[in-house]
Image: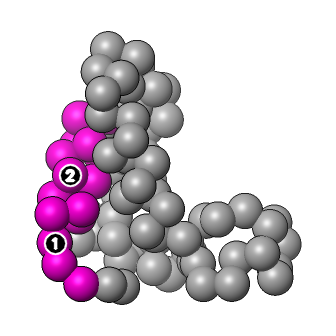
Amino acid sequence: MGVDVRDLSAYLVRHPQKLPVVARAGWRLRRRAWWRRAPYLPLPSPGYWEFRMVTANGTNGAPMTGRAVVEAATWSLRQRGGR
């Protein structure tokens, strides 16, 4: 479950204008008060990440392709409101 990091990296190398979209969407997924708990990185909580993968991908089994990640990030940023 998750993202195919190699495919996402290759997609972003071919489409560098999409990098800010992915970065902004990733920042929105971060766990609240992430700096207070190890690993001290702005990562989403595991439960929230699983929920987002199921809603974006339709399943929690197969990793998302780079294009699918960018499409989900674009959709996410178009939505109004907070978390």
Can you tell which mark lies on residue 74?
2
In front of the other: 80 or 10? 80
Q: Residue at x 58, y 78 (%)?
A: 31
Label 2 sits on what residue type?
Thr
Q: Main secondary structure of the magenta part?
A: helix
Q: Are marks 2 and 1 in contact (CB under 8 Å)?
A: no
Image coordinates for residue 52, horizontal then vertical, percent: 34, 71
> Can you see residue 54?
yes
Image coordinates for residue 37, horizontal then vertical, percent: 81, 80
Tag 2 secondary structure: helix
Q: Residues within 10 Å of mark 1 (few under 14, many from 20)?
A: few
The disc, 2 or 1, on the residue closer to the chain's N-terminal end is: 2
State the colouring used for the structure image. one colour
| Residue matched to label 1 | 79
Residue 9 covered by magenta stretch:
no
In front of the other: 20 or 2? 20
